[in-house]
Amino acid sequence: MADLTFGARTARALAKRGPLCVGIDPHAQLLRAWGLDDDIAGAERFCLTMVEAIAGEVAFIKPQSAFFERFGSAGIALLERVVTESRQAGALVLLDVKRGDIGSTMRAYAQAYLDPASPLAVDAVTASPYLGVGSLEPLFDMAQAHDRGVFVLALTSNAEGAQVQKARRKDGRTVGQAVIDEIGGLNADAEPMGSLGVVIGATITGCREESELAGRQKTYGITHTAQTTGETAHELSRLNGPILVPGMGAQGGQPSDLRRVLGAAAGAAIPSYSREIARQGPALPGLRQAAATAMEACRKAIGR
Ligand SMILES: O=c1ccn([C@@H]2O[C@H](COP(=O)(O)O)[C@@H](O)[C@H]2O)c(=O)[nH]1
């Protein structure tokens, strides 16, 4: 068992290394942009270069499981290596795997990712609450038993999410807000913060013109439009946990969005960039500089 809770390790990592999470997504387009083949050898070169450049610098590394799974068992073996080497370099590893299931199946997922005896054990995972937040209990229990964390999807960065997450419940709250409130209840009284986080995209509830965001998204061939102004006034004051903020960079989110989207809770933000940093590779200095620049901009925007 780790000495500190995941919430305490997160607070310490953010204070020491600054507010940044870098995603490792061995994406076919990125591999080609680095002059690599879209195969397991290319993915290995890409991932290990990202780890070498960045895992010693940033608070969080976030491998996206799907991009490893597409290579089958060799991809999973590579993911295990990325996890081990990133942790050795001092980063907390958040596996973006968005699991959500029921009962004994959820317990098996919990064992796979949060039991330190598992070959794929990480510091935290992302999880989907859309089978009911209560269905994630086995994951929460495993996280608590082993000082690990879980980031629960609340208001995701994709436009399609709004249809579910911004639907109104009978009590007047949105579904996303109810997720935030349930996680806040489970984090109550934890110090310095709880080990259960939420995921809130940088692209939600824009207060700037859609056309500006669309212009930034065009660079990456993203065609969707983010959710816009005034659709949800979410309340984060009782969350008492970390907030993973994907959608930075490639999807159009900027450091200034952290305060706009999270308000006073921006101090708990973990802004997450994947393609935006990786496309500065493969040279190590370019990757390190991109991460340092993003981190400094986020730190300034948050005022931490
Ligand atoms: O709401 C969400 C939740 C997770 N993601 C994941 O983050 C990265 C984003 O990659 P970029 O290249 O920075 O756009 C990717 O792994 C997503 O699956 C998200 O985008 N939005």
Image: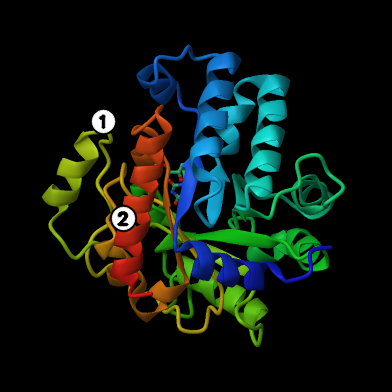
Q: In this view, does 20 lie to the left or right of 133?
A: left
As rendered, which of 240 and 166 lies closer to the eye? 240
Q: Where is residue 68 in the image (x, y as percent from the top left)?
A: 60, 29
Q: Quadrant of the N terminus?
A: bottom right
In which quadrant of the rendered view does residue 165 lie? bottom left
Outermost residue, bottom side: 189
**Above/below status of 303 relative to 140:** below
What residue lies at 47% left-to-right and 66% top-to-bottom?
176
Q: Quadrant of ligand 1?
A: top left
Q: Is mark 2 within 8 Å of ligand 1?
A: no
Quadrant in the rendering for residue 86: top right
Three-letter code for the amino acid on which mark 1 is drawn: Gly
Q: Residue at x 53, y 17 (%)?
A: 42
Residue 203 makes an appearance in the image = yes
Neighbourhood count class around disc 2 (C-alpha, 10 Å): few under 14, some 14–19, many 20 upward:
many
Residue beneath disc 1: 221
- Type of residue at label 2? Thr
Label 1, label 2: how far apart the Cα atoms are: 16 Å
Q: Where is residue 198 in the image (x, y as percent from the top left)?
A: 53, 64
User: What residue would you read off at disc 2?
Assistant: 203
Tell me the SS state at disc 1.
Answer: loop
Which residue appears at 31% of the width and 52% of the height? 293
Establish if 86 lies above or below 175.
Answer: above
Q: Residue furthest front?
A: 285
